[in-house]
Each structure stands twice: as C-alpha cells, then as structure tokens.
Image (tube, rainbow, N blue to C red):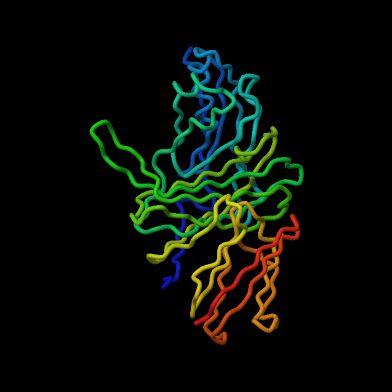
Amino acid sequence: LVISAKAQTFPNAGFETWRNYSVSTSPFPGSPVLNLQAPDNWYGVDSLVAGVTLIASLGGITIEAEKQLFLSTQAHSGTNSAEVRTAFIGDDIGNAPGVFANAQIGIDLAAAINGDPSDILSFISYTGGTSVSAKVDTVSAWVMTPATNMDSALINVQAVKIVPGSAGDSTVVLGVGAYVVQPGLTQFVQVKVPVFYTSTEIPEKLLVAFISSNIAADTTHAGNSLFVDDVSYTTAGPVSVRQPLFSEDQLIVYPNPSNDVVYFNLNAGVRAQDCVLTVTDVTGKVIFTEQLTQQINAKNVSAWAKGNYFFNLTNTATGKFENGKISVK
C-alpha cells in the first residue's frame, strides 16, 4: 500500500529574501574582500572558497575566488530565483561548479591540499539541513538552464541521520537521490528527484544541493549556470518511491502485480520529454500512449480488466527502448 504523499516546503523555498555579506580572502588588514549574497536559510560554496584561499596557498594551491551565487529576477513565481554559476577560480583548480544548498558547506582542507586540486568538490561536506520526521519520497524544484549552457547541471539529495559518538557526531546517509538537469531548458520546468533508501530507518535531516555543472561529466565550462525556484519535498508512507539511479535501466515499474496504482519511473539521467510510454493488452490493443513530462509517472489501473499487459518505453533522443509485462489482479 502506498500512502498519499504530503507536500512540504523548505524555509525561504522561493528565494524571495536574501542577505548580502563580504568575505575576506586573507586575514591581513586591507586584504581584498569578495562581496557575496545568498538566500536566507541557504548557503553558497563561493563564501567557503573565498575563506580558504590563504590556507590553500600554504599548501601550494592558488585560488582566485569568484562570486558564484546570484539573485535573479527571472522567476517561476514571486520576484526572485537563485542562479548558481560555474566559474574559473585559478590555474590550479580550473573551472569549479557553483554549489548552493539548504545546509552549511564545509571542506576538508587537509584532504584537499594533499589530494588532487582539480577534484576539490569531492572534499566538500554539509552540516545542518532541513529537519524531517518521515521518509522523504521526492524533492521538487522549478529549474531553468540558459541556451548558452554547455554542461548539464546536477541536483543532489541526501536523507541522513545524525549519530552521536565519543569522537563527535557522525552523519549516516540513509537515502540518496540525483537528477541531471540537461542544457536547453530555457523556461522554468518542474523536475522531481526521487529518494532511494537502503535503510528502513527514518531520517532526521534532508540535504539538497544544486550544482551548476555535473561534477561527474568530463568537462566543466565557466559560465554554465542553473536557475532554481520554488523547492519542495513530499513525504509518504512506509513504501517510498523507488528510482533507478544512473543504472543501465531507463525505467523501473512497480508494484507488479498491482490492483491499484502502477508507477513507471525514469532513471535520473533520462529526460522525461524524450520518452514515450505505451501500454497494450495481450491482443495488441493500445490502452494508452503518452509523451512523458515527469520522472515519476503513476497510473491508476483499478478500472483495468484483470490480466496481463505489455509496456514499451521509447527514448526518442537515443533510440533506446525497453519493454516488459505488468499484471493487474
């Protein structure tokens, strides 16, 4: 049984209120400062990068901090949205994706200095986040990407539990979600990031990060940006929405068999607008065919005749397809 999801919002989910502040790039008097801004209750990585320039230089890493999080008046609703942008921050690191999150962003400087400087984002961690008291099924956001973008962007979600210990608190990840935002979304489009759980425990915090360039891609271009507005999440019952994350499968279909609702959920790396889903009965009669618009697609089958049906998913962008059988009981 899947219990109806309940929508929740993040503090300042529409990014209508912002704070302005400055970060010094050195502790010495008269040092240059970087003037920054961030939505209230949200945090950017650009302040972190500016704050560690001196310490990084002691390890032989030169950083040229740049502003990467901007208030934009292009909005899905209200007046403002957030724009996060990839920037060139020096020859040692090159182009670094901008990151902003609902949690404070930290960095393991020792690991960063001793590791590969071009992979500095792998040393970033998050503390804080949004408190939750149930499993989060889906995080939703309205996003837009300029026509000039060359990189895909990334949304990363973690549902975590804080475990106290004698050496300090540790963060245990109970659920994860990811969504690759493709270039060319020149109008705001709602995307949904399902959260996949490997534990039956209930999380305490929800961490959401928006990253201007997909850090798993081969190339990262300065100026690539992601606009974000109206972020929300849903919680549901004990059976959470499942999703194939970066697997070979384009689609997961469940529950199967069913007498109520069947979910046809896309891989996080597949664009819904590229996919056509068709279901037929055993005689070949088309029950429905649909150009998808969402990653999560629920179909009520309670009125269907009992028996077997066949589905086919065609990806018009790649030419790939998947098919299979579902049963209605």
The residue at 45%/47% (across/down) is 158
Determine whether 200 is above or below 47 in the image: below
Residue 322 drawn above or below residue 110: below
The x and y percentages for residue 178 are 54, 49
Identify the image quadrant of residue 164.
top left
- The total number of labels drawn is 0
Q: Residue at x 49, y 60 (%)?
A: 242
Q: Position of residue 23 (x, y in %)?
A: 51, 25
Drawn side of residue 319 relative to residue 46, left or right: right
Q: Position of residue 229 (x, y in %)?
A: 58, 52
**Residue 77 visible in image:** no
Tell me where residue 218 appears, x and y as whole percent: 67, 35
Q: Is residue 125 above or below residue 31?
A: below
**Which of these two is toward me, 321 or 196?**
321
Q: Is residue 231 left or right of residue 165?
A: right
Q: Residue 148 versus residue 119: which sits nearer the camera?
A: 119
Q: From this viewpoint, which residue is outermost toward the left? A: 166
Quarter of the image where the N terminus is located:
bottom left
